[in-house]
Image (cartoon, grey):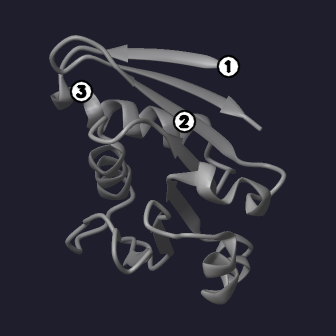
């Protein structure tokens, strides 16, 4: 388990680069944090580190957004906040995404815990004072 504290959101790109380098063979990242903690903002920094030039936004209503990295690799960004049951994830064909070998950045994974692959990176974000964020990262 690793813990990283930042005091300013301008530090997010550096942390995103470190995370991608430290877990370069991993593709599934699950983000646990309260509303407003910066999950989408951090995922945007990760996508930018991967060379995404598309507009990066939360897929709150569409559940999944697809981006293209500079190297042509697909990146999937999920937001399961609004689903009412795991059946909605089944209906959207979650396994086609999770087992595609593409990066999958998942917001609100606690809504689909039983569907997460056996190996993923858990990123917990806690809010400190002002812009302070504490990231706890662990292999599951």
* Rendered residue at 73%/35% (across/down): 139
Label drawn at residue 11: 3
Q: Earlier in the sequence, mark 2 or mark 1?
A: 1
Dot 2: element:
strand
Q: Residue furthest right?
A: 118
- Please tell me how crowded label 2 is: few (under 14), some (14-19), or many (20+) other residues with Cα within 10 Å: many
Label drawn at residue 123: 2
**67 vs 35, nearest the viewer:** 35
- Please tell me how crowded label 1 is: few (under 14), some (14-19), or many (20+) other residues with Cα within 10 Å: few
Dot 3: element:
helix
Can you give x and y, in whole percent of width and height, for residue 39 in the image?
A: 36, 45
Image quadrant occupied by the C terminus: top right
Q: Earlier in the sequence, mark 3 or mark 1?
A: 1
Task: Describe residue 95's horizontal placement relative to residue 21 as left or right.
Answer: right
> Closer to the observer: label 2 or label 3?
2
* Rendered residue at 60%/18% (across/down): 2
> Closer to the observer: label 3 or label 1?
1
Q: Earlier in the sequence, mark 2 or mark 3?
A: 3
- Please tell me how crowded label 3 is: few (under 14), some (14-19), or many (20+) other residues with Cα within 10 Å: few
Can you give x and y, in whole percent of width and height, for residue 137 in the image?
A: 59, 28
* Rendered residue at 39%/71% (across/down): 69
Decide: is 79 above or below 127: below
Q: Quadrant of residue 61?
A: bottom left
C-alpha separation, residue under disc 3 versus residue under disc 1: 20 Å
Task: Describe residue 126's horizontal placement relative to residue 90 as left or right.
Answer: left
Task: Describe residue 50's horizontal placement relative to residue 102 as left or right.
Answer: left
* Rendered residue at 44%/73% (across/down): 71
C-alpha separation, residue under disc 2 versus residue under disc 3: 16 Å
CB of mark 2 within 8 Å of CB of mark 3? no
The number of callouts visible is 3
Residue linked to disc 1: 1
Can you give x and y, in whole percent of width and height, for residue 35 in the image?
A: 33, 42
């Amino acid at each position: 388990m690793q813990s990283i504290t930042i005091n300013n959101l301008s530090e997010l790109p550096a942390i995103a680069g470190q995370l991608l380098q430290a877990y370069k063979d991993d593709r599934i990242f699950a983000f646990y944090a309260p509303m407003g903690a910066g999950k989408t903002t951090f995922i945007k920094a990760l996508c930018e580190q991967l060379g995404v030039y598309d507009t990066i936004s939360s897929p709150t209503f569409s559940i999944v957004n697809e981006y293209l990295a500079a190297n042509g690799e697909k990146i999937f960004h999920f937001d399961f906040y609004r689903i009412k049951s795991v059946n909605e994830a089944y209906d959207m064909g979650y396994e086609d995404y999770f087992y595609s070998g593409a990066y999958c950045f998942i917001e609100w994974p606690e809504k689909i815990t039983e569907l997460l692959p056996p190996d993923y990176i858990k990123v917990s974000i806690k809010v400190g004072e002002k812009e302070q964020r504490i990231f706890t990262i662990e292999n599951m």
